[in-house]
Amino acid sequence: MLKEGSSLGEAVNPVLEKCHRDNSTGSILLAVNREYSKEDRILNDGDEIAVMPLVSGG
C-alpha cells in the first residue's frame, strides 16, 4: 500500500529491488493508465501501473 501523494518511482523501486535490478529506471519503460510516464509522476488512487523492460532484437 502506498501513501497518498507517492510517485511512480516510489511504487516501482521495490519491484526492481525484488528483481535484482538497478533502481535506475533508464532500462525500463513506465506507464500509468496506458500512457508513458516518468518516475516523478504523482499517483492517484486507482491508477494502473505498467513496468516494461526494454527489448531488442533483429
Image: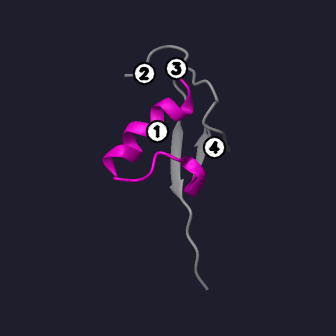
Per the model, the C-alpha gap separating discs 4 and 3 is 15 Å
**Splitting the image into 4 quarters, where does residue 3 fall?**
top left
Q: Which residue is mark 1?
A: 12
**Splitting the image into 4 quarters, where does residue 55 fall?**
bottom right
In the rendered structure, find residue 2 and report the number of the disc placed on it. Answer: 2
| Residue type of the residue flagged with mark 1 | Val
**Splitting the image into 4 quarters, where does residue 56 fall?**
bottom right
**Contact, mark 1 vs mark 2 (Cβ under 8 Å):** no
Disc with the residue nearer the chain's start (1 vs 4): 1
Q: Locate residue 5, reporting x and y percent.
A: 55, 16
**Is residue 7 inside the magenta stretch?**
yes
Per the model, the C-alpha gap separating discs 1 and 3 is 15 Å
| Residue type of the residue flagged with mark 4 | Arg
Per the model, the C-alpha gap separating discs 1 and 4 is 16 Å
Q: Secondary structure at mark 2?
A: loop
For this rendering, which residue is in front, 12 or 36? 12
Q: Please say if 18 is above or below 4.
A: below
Disc with the residue nearer the chain's start (1 vs 2): 2
Which residue lies at the image location 38% right of the left edge and 42% below the top edge?
15
Which residue lies at the image location 44% right of the left edge and 51% below the top edge?
22
Q: Which residue is mark 3?
A: 45
- Magenta segment boundaries in residue numbering: 6-28
| Residue type of the residue flagged with mark 3 | Asp
Between label 4 and label 2, give the one nearer the viewer: 2
